[in-house]
Amino acid sequence: MHGRPRNASKPEEEAASAAKAVQLRSLQSQFMTNHHDKIYTNEAIELSTKLLEINPEAYTAWNYRKLAVEDRLARIEPDPNLVSAILDEELRVVESALRQNFKSYGAWHHRKWVLSKGHSSVGNELRLLEKFQKLDSRNFHAWNYRRFVVELTNRSEQDELQYTDDMINNNFSNYSAWHNRSVLLSSLLAQNADGFMPNIKIPEEYDFVHSAIFTEPDDQSGWFYHLWLLDQTLNVETPLLTSSWPSHGSSIILSGAGCLSGSSSMFTTFCSESGSFPLILYFDQAVGGVSSSTVTIDSELKGNEGLVWEPIPNKNSQVSCVWVARLKYVSSDPCEYKVKIRVGNSPGIVSSRGYNFNAPYEFVFTAHVHDTVEDSQEGIVSWTDGFDIWDAKSKDLNSLVTLDRLNAEMDFKWRQEAIDSEVECFGILPDSKIGKLTLARLLMAREAMVSDDAVKGVHYEEILQLYNDLMALDSSHYQYYKDEHSKAFLHKVTSSSESLSRHLLRYRDMNNLVCLRLNNLSLSRIASVEKLLFVQMLDLSHNELHSTEGLEAMQLLSCLNLSHNRIRSFSALDSLRHVKQLKVLDVSHNHIGKHSVDTTRYLCSSLLSNSELGQDDVGKQNPGLVTKYWDAYCVLRDLNLKQLDIAGNEIAGEEFSSFVLQVVPKLVWLDGQKKLGN
C-alpha cells in the first residue's frame, strides 16, 4: 500500500507463524467456550487478553471484553478508583494489541469505546498518539483517532492545523496529514474563523502545497491536496440557477398532438397529447425546496395553481440539480401569453449542503398557443433526410441558448486570480502525467469562470491536447482521460452560440424540430446538458457511449439516435424513463445482450424487490419473458415510443421483437418495419 513493496517471508518467520497458529487455535477454542457461557472471571478475561495479544483482529474478543467490563462495573460499588482501574486495564490491553498491529480496526474502536465511558485518560492520548505516529506517521487509524480525541478536549483546530504543518514539513508524502489538513480547513473556512477567509487562506494554501509538489513531483499526496484546493476555489456555496427552459426572452409555439402547417423556424414548436409542457430549472448543485411557494408563475394560462415540482431523476430523493413542472394549456383556445417566472423570491430553496438560494431571478417568455391543423403523422423519422442548416446569425438561436448568464453576476475575481496564478505556475512544470492532468483541470476551471465572450473558449484546444497526451502516456487510466476529453469537447461545443450552431439543424418534417448533431465524435460521456435543454432531436450515433446518464434533464427530447455506440444493456438507458416526450429511439448496432455479466444492471429495479413491476398484462401473460428481459422491460414500459430500432444487437431477434411490441403497445415502427394494423 502507498507504494511500499511487500517483502517475501523468511523460513524462520514462516515457522514462527505456524507455531503462532497452533497456539491461536487452542486459545480460540477455550475463549469461545467462555464467551458462549458468559463467563467473566479474571481467568477468562486474561485468556481473552492473550488471544488479542496474538491476534488483535479478533473482533469477537473485543466485543467479549466490552461485555465483561459492563458486567464488572455492574458488580462493584460506584468507586471512581475501581472504575478507573478497570478502564485503565482495557487501555493497556489496547496499547499492547496496537504494538502488535498498528492498523487493527478492533483495537482502535475498543479504545474509543473506553474513552466514551468517560475515562479521564484523555489528556494522555495525544502523547501516546505522537509515539505511535513516529512509527507510522501516515496511519489513517491514528489520524481518525486523533480527531476523535481532539473533539473530547479543548484543543483548538488552529493548533491541530499547526500540527499538520509540522507533520507535512517532516514528510511531504504524509497523505493522512494532508487529508486532516483539508478537514480542519473546511471547518475553519465554514466558520469564517479569524484569519481564515477563503480569498486569503486558499491562495496561501496553494503556496504551501507548491513546496511539496515541486520538491517531490512523483508523490501523489500533494497533488491530491492541490485537487482539493481547486474544488474549494471553484466551490460557490450559494446555489445558482444556471439555465432554464424556456429561456428568458424566448418564444414557443404550443399545440395539441400532431403537426402544424408552416411552423415557423423562428420558434420552438412543442406538441403535446396531454396539453402540458415542461418548465425546467437547472441549478449548479443539488437543491431541495423547489415548490409553488418558492417559484411563482405570473401567467394567464389557466389551471396552473399549486403547480407540482418534481426532482429529475427522482430516486427517492428530494434534492436534485434539475427540477421540472408541467404547465397546462388548452390547444383549442389559440392565443398569445406572456409567462413570468420568479425563482427564489420566497426563502425555501436550499442546497444539499444546507446553503440557501439567495440570488432571486426572474425570466419571461412568450407562449403562442395554436390549434393543431393537421393530423398526427405516423411516418418514419429519418436521420439522413429532411434537415435544414441552421442560420448561425439567426436571433432565435440566441433566445434559445442561455450561456452562463448568471455566473457573470458573481464575484469571481479572487478565484480567477488564484486559477491564473496556478496555470502560470504549472505551465513551467516538467512534463508528467499528474502535471498534465492538473493543468487540464486548471484550464477547465478557468473556462468555467470566463464571462467575456471575446476570450471564452480559448483554452479548449490546449485542454483537449493534454487529454490526448494523457491517453497516450497512461493506458491504465485511458477510459478516465477519454471521458474527460469528451466532457471538455462538449463544453467547447456549447461555449458559444457560434460553436453550437455548427451542430444544429431543423427537421422540417416534424414542425422544424431543433436537432443537435454530435455524431462521429468519439464521445464516451455526455456533458453540458444544462446548455442543451431546448434540443428536441439529438444524434449521438457512431460514438463510444456506454450510458445515457445526463440526458434526463433534456425534457424536450423527442427523437434520440444512439446507434453504433457501446451500450451493453437497456439498463444503461434508465435515465430515458424520465424523458416523457421521447417518441423515437434508435439503439441499433450496440452491444446489448452480448455480455452475460453487465455491471449496469443495478441501475434498474430488482425483479424481487418491486412487487408492482411485472403485474401488468405483459407480466401476467409472459412472466418468463419479463424475467429474461427484465432490464428492457423496466425501461421500455415507461416510454411512450412510436419508433424503435434495435437491429444489430445480440438481443435482437423474433422473440425479443415480439416481446417489445407487447411492452410498448403504441409502437408503430420497429426496425424500419411498420407494425401490423397501423
Image (spheres, grey):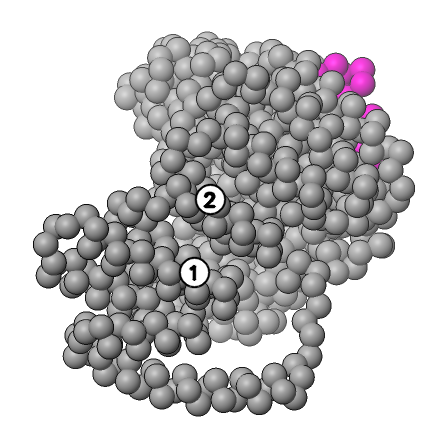
Q: Where does residue 352 sit, x and y in percent of width and height?
A: 42, 32
Precedes in sequence: disc 1 or disc 2: 1
- Callout 1 crowding tier (Cα within 10 Å): few <14, some 14–19, many ≥20: some
Distance from the alpha carbon under mark 1 to that under mark 2: 13 Å
Instruction: Give the residue drawn at x 66%, y 41%.
Output: 168
**Residue 147 point in image, percent of width and height:** 45, 42
Name the residue tied to disc 2.
Answer: 126
- Residue 559 visible from this viewpoint: no
As for residue 198 lying within the magenta part, the answer is no
Image quadrant in which you'd find residue 624: bottom left
Which residue is pictured at 28% across the width and 80% down the height?
31
Left/right of residue 337 with respect to residue 9 in the rendered view: left
Membership of 463 in magenta stretch: yes
User: Which numbered disc covers residue 95?
Assistant: 1
Is 66 left or right of 323, judged from the image as shown? left
Expressed as whole percent of the image width and height from the top left, the position of residue 86 reads: 25, 58
Write down the quadrant of residue 247 in the picture. Answer: top right
Instruction: Please say if 557 is above or below 1.
Output: above
Instruction: Identify the magenta region.
Output: 450-464
Q: How many marks?
A: 2
